[in-house]
Amino acid sequence: MDHIEHLEHTESPANMKSQIWRTFWVLLALTLVDIVLYFVLLSSHSIAKNILFVFLGIVKAFYIVSVFMHMKFERKFLVWIIIAPMIFVCFLIWLALTEAGYTFGMRLF
Amino acid sequence: MANSATLTTDSKQTWGGGKSPFSVSYGKLMMWIFLLSDAFTFSSLLVAYGFVRFTFTGSLPNTVVKPFAHLSHNFVEEMQKAGLFVTERWPSPELVFNHFPFLHGIHLPLMFVSLMTFILIFSSVTMVLAVEAGHRMAKKEVENYMILTIIGGAAFLGCQAWEWTNFITEGASLSSNPFGPTAFAALFFIVTGFHGTHVLSGVILNIVIYLNVVNGTYEKRGHYEMVEKVGLYWHFVDLVWVFVFTFFYLI
């Protein structure tokens, strides 16, 4: 033990292990919900169905980032540094899908 | 565990230097910044996929094959004749990714990719358990969980190789696609390939970390933070897969 480093970090709660397993079951359940919905809605193609699957994806992402990636326990400042720039992705999605609508029209006529 | 976060409300103390205002080490902060940039890269690829897909006519509802039905050996030609696989129309992922190993000739949409998703989620759990064991300085436990994580990653890569082989054997490539628009196959290979490259580098990093754990490098250092940093990367790869799974297979 000759090179012991000084290390700054935010503590994990005492029940971390049970939180990990709970998150695992949540993720497993959400994926199973995905699969069941997929087969139930197999023959329907609608925007509502797409939004539903994207929403479930975002919920899964939330659990992975907050518990597995420990973000729930980090300083608020760090959380916002990582989350806030995602607004640009939202902008890109809006921009791309709007433009895609016009391109679709050009393809048709 | 030597110096845990002490909550300071005094901003002079927070920004006065000599300590991290974020209460994380430099390396971990930089890993977060890297993951943010990587998230942008994957977002651009997925948005590109969304853009291209939106410019095509949507898939026709499939009234031809039901799940668990038997597939004829010239399934792709039949679908082309039925007008479900044409270049002007985006194919339904259900009809493209419908194979399962050892169950050849049965229409099983989503099954194989769900298995891949479970493998990746589970390897994420073993990774975070390795991190947790690292906090307790339990060397043996970290070793075991790292091994499980590496196996999970390798299993996922094997599954992806199988999926690619299937798709390529059926005639898909970056410049051709018997299922519909060429862009469908090109985007599939680019996005899953880029994700697969991330999984591969993750597995390599995990192996390096595992060897360091076995050699007692972190035991000597006094903390297992390297496991945490690589863990962040590994969870990110799992996170990206959630969206690849959603956009390429579910929708």
Image: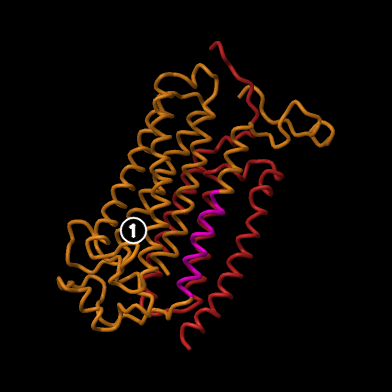
Chain colours: A red, B orange
> In front: B246, or A66?
B246
Q: Which residues are magenta?
A: B38-54
**In this picture, residue B97 sits left or right of residue B201:** left
**In this picture, residue B5 sits left or right of residue B133:** right
Residue B162 is inside the magenta segment: no
What's the residue at 64%, 65% (across, down)? A91
Instruction: Label 1: state its secondary structure.
Output: helix
The part of the image, by quadrant, that contains residue B93 is bottom left
Image quadrant in which the C terminus of chain B is located: bottom left
Residue at the disc numbered 1:
B113
Q: How many marks?
A: 1
Does residue B53 sit above or below B140 in this rendering? below
Q: Residue furthest front?
A: B175
What's the residue at 62%, 45% (across, down)? A72
> In front: B55, or B8?
B55
**In this picture, residue A61 sits left or right of residue B99:** right
Q: Residue furthest bottom?
A: A109
The chief SS type of the magenta part is helix
The part of the image, by quadrant, that contains residue B31 is top right
Residue type (three-letter) at the residue carrying disc 1: Val
Q: Residue furthest left?
A: B73
